[in-house]
Image: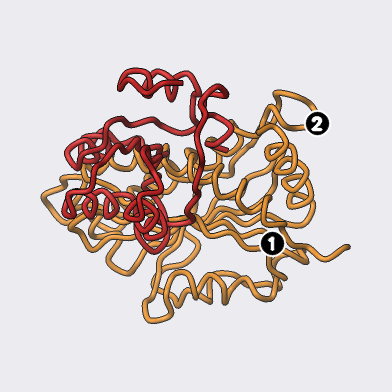
Amino acid sequence: MLIKSLPSTWDVEITQAVNGKEALDAYRAGKADVMFLDLTMPVMDGYEVLENIQKEGLNSFVIVVSADIQPLAQERVKKLGAMAFIKKPVNPDLIESALKQYGIAL
Amino acid sequence: MSAMQLTEDQRDAMQEITNIAMGQAGSLLAELLGNFVNLSVPRIKVLALAEVARAIRDMVGSDIDVTAVRQSFQGYLTGEALVIYGQNGCTELGDLMGYDEELDRSEETELLLDVSNVLVGACLGGIVDQIKNLTEAHGTAELGFSAPSVMAESVPADALINPDKLSWTHALLVEVNFTLEGRNFISHLCMLMPEHSIEKMCSILDRFVESY
């Protein structure tokens, strides 16, 4: 569903992961320049993914996309290095503006 | 009735819808209790009625006694919502809400009913909000709720549902749970819907998937 909310003009290859661990593995393998990360996931949640990215000093560009709308959740992911927080249900315009804000060519 | 199961797409859609609804409920709970709330990954199952009690026990844990509040809902969807607390859930609630003195039994019950009502209302309301434009009558999907009532206190989790009391053959069981950071508190919200609501939900979920 998120994939359909990405800008249609954005020419990218998409890798999907079903949980945080898979996402982190794909990230480590250099399969992503941008990661859209949910927080509530089995096996490894989004916070742990961010912690690991930070710990391993991976080059990170993570946009958190979550239904967890507690203000504290937003604060925490920003502290853990997330570039943006977009709440679900996703408004495609917000994705586009977040990407543009960081100079990603669409 | 044909074999009742959700397809993978339907389950994914239900999980996504539930996740969004529980996020709203969790945020209200966080505000109410002044504590960060951890959200679970929603668990979704279609079960024969006889399997429901065991499924709930498996989700809640068999080693603890639970206290549960129930609210039935009817309207566009019909079913039962149970909010299940671990043994010390009620005492923890009073403490979290900042009551210094120990609450008496009726105050404790009132608090339990209030918190449960918030969770049930926000979760089911959140689900209906997302699906109402996908119903046959576009834009309408009203739900009415019964008053919350304590259905059981300190009982094993598999004693909550008595299949003899329900005239259903199947149930869609949707479970989410809320835990509080740094506290020994958990509350499970289980939503149960019988076959005619499952059929409605399935068509809605198909339309939800198509809309993306």
Q: Compared with residue B205, is residue B102 higher up or lower down, i.e. above or below?
A: below
Which residue sits at x=68%, y=37%? B208
Q: Which mark is residue A25?
A: none
Q: Quadrant location of residue B89?
A: bottom left
Q: Position of residue B81 (x, y in %)?
A: 55, 53
**Is B104 displayed left or right of B131 in the figure?**
left
Q: Earlier in the sequence, mark 2 or mark 1?
A: 2
Determine the CA span between mark 2 and mark 1: 22 Å
Which amino acid type is shown beneath numbered disc 2?
A: Glu
Chain coloured orange: which letter?
Answer: B
The residue wearing badge 2 is: B136
Callout 1: SS: strand
Q: How is the image coloured?
A: by chain
**Is B53 displayed left or right of A86 in the figure?**
right
Which residue sits at x=11%, y=49%? B100
Subunit ID for the residue under disc 1: B
The residue wearing badge 1 is: B171
Which residue lies most toward the bottom here?
Answer: B63
Which amino acid type is shown beneath numbered disc 1?
A: Ala
Tell me the quarter of the image containing the N terminus of chain B: bottom right
Q: Position of residue A86 (x, y in %)?
A: 38, 30
Callout 2: SS: loop
Q: Residues within 10 Å of mark 1 (few under 14, many from 20)?
A: many
Q: Position of residue B157 (x, y in %)?
A: 47, 74
Chain coloured red: which letter?
Answer: A
Q: Position of residue B54 (x, y in %)?
A: 57, 77
Relative depth, front residue between B46 and B117: B46
**Is B170 displayed left or right of B115 in the figure?**
right
Asked whether the residues under marks 2 and 1 belong to the same chain, the reply is: yes
Is there a contact, CB below 8 Å, between mark 2 and mark 1?
no
